[in-house]
Image (cartoon, helix red, strand yellow):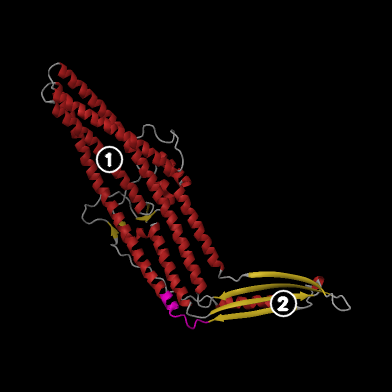
Amino acid sequence: MKQIVKTCVVGGLFLALSGCSMAPVYQQPQLPVASTLQDRYLETLPSSGITGHMESMSGAGWREVFTDPVLQQLIAMALQNNRDLRETALNVEAYQAQYRIQKSNQLPTVSSEGYGSKQRNLGGAGHTTSETYSLQVRVTAYELDFFGRVKNLKDQALEQYLAMEEARKSAEISLVAEVSRAYLTWLADRELLQITQDTERLEAESYALVKNRLDGGVATELDLAQARSSLEGVRANLAMYRRQVAQDYHYLNLLTGTSLSEHVLPEKGMLHDVKPLAVMPASLSSSVLLQRPDIIAAEHELKGANANIGAARAAFFPTISLTAGAGVVSTDLSDLFNGSSGSWLFAPTITVPIFTAGRLQAELDVAQIEKERYVVRYEQAIQTAFREVSDALVAVETYEKQLLAQKGNLDASEQYFQHARNRYEEGVDSFLTLLDAQRSLYSSRQAYLSLNLAQLENQVNLYKVLGGGWKETTE
């Protein structure tokens, strides 16, 4: 047993001497974008009264951003049941297991082996029986990581696992945003359906009015044909919106991974009742982009490529493996642990690359090129994120102004329709003027609602492109 202890001590010394890394010192690339996220060609947004600085919010904080109760329920169902998200989570578990495998290579594999045999010699005058029993503990082909090859391979596996974990977070954020968009679209299409139903009623009343005036000899057949054409056009839109509402409902079922019951969705909810996000900042520091999961994942991939260079460099140096063991041997099982006899094994192996036909250099070149490729990918991810966030911030201001102007257009269209209808009933204007007013009102209602939807979708998109939104902190 003393020999076993001695072997373990020797192995521990080799472990202490190993682990020198040959990977380059990692340096985070500079941000290839401006320092702030604000468009200089637009007017500054009114101050929101927020003091301090803005920080990125992880996907787990979506309840602080999306406060609508129905929307919260839908998002929670999707995060629990969505199949695409479940597949991503399984991928994370697979990479985590791969990392554990690579990490285990840094430690020796210790095994114990027991052996016993009984042999009888049938030849000669005597029939002798011999017995042999042994017990050994050994370390088999453990690589002493003097040049950090095993460590760098472990680091690479770790970075791959961490990158996949960030990909899972990104998938969660995307799912939260997609469920929000789908719910908002369902509300908007249902409201458009209601607007179209109201318009159909007005068109039907106008058609009946023209028909009565035609019977009274006041209107013409042309007026009646125009009224019918307008009515049938609205009825065609009515069928289209009914189809869209049903398809929106089916998409929500797909995202939430379940069949939504009628009591989950509001019976009379309107789009303008939903406020997905709080007041947004006029500008942000570009550093918040570094909190986006896709950018964090890109940096983990870059770090993994950096570690791979260390493994490729270490391949130029000798590989030292150690096989060691110690045990006891006895001819009697009862004396096996009484120190009757002992054995030990110490067998280091060194492998030195002499001629590889340039393979090792080529592998190192590939590793270095891969790192440069990941640097480019990392910088491209930041530039893409900068553009996405800048576009969303620009849209915050422009949608506010556009929506205000569209509301004025809607108010004017409603007045135009009322005046046109009164004047037609009084016989002052022709039906063509009333028809134009009805179409203008219908179009204005559609445009205002669609613009309202686009504004809310942009708020959802801002939550997504900021890597899960933002939170306000005070200094």
**10 Å crowding of disc 2: few (<14), some (14-19), many (20+):** few
Residue 431 drawn at (x, y percent): 14, 26
| Closer-to-camera residue (444/245) | 245
Q: CA distance from mark 1 to mark 2?
A: 83 Å
**10 Å crowding of disc 1: few (<14), some (14-19), many (20+):** some
Residue depicted at x 48% and y 46%? 80
| Closer-to-camera residue (322/165) | 322
Q: Secondary structure at mark 2?
A: helix
Q: Secondary structure at mark 1?
A: helix
Q: Is residue 67 left or right of residue 393?
A: right
Question: With respect to residue 382, does 324 lie above or below?
Answer: below
Which residue is the extreme one toward the top? 216
Q: Amino acid at mark 2?
A: Lys
Magenta residue span? 352-364
Question: With respect to residue 211, does 246 lie above or below?
Answer: below
Is residue 247 visible in the rendered image? The answer is yes
Residue depicted at x 38% and y 47%? 177
**Which sits earlier in the primary sequence, circle 1 or circle 2?**
2
Residue 163 drawn at (x, y percent): 44, 61
Q: Nearer the viewer, mark 1 or mark 2?
A: 1
| Closer-to-camera residue (399/188) | 188
Say which quadrant the C terminus sits in: bottom left
**Residue located beneath label 1 in the image:** 450
Q: Quadrant of residue 186?
A: top left
**Residue located beneath label 2 in the image:** 2
Which residue is the extreme one toward the front? 123
Is residue 419 visible in the rendered image? The answer is no
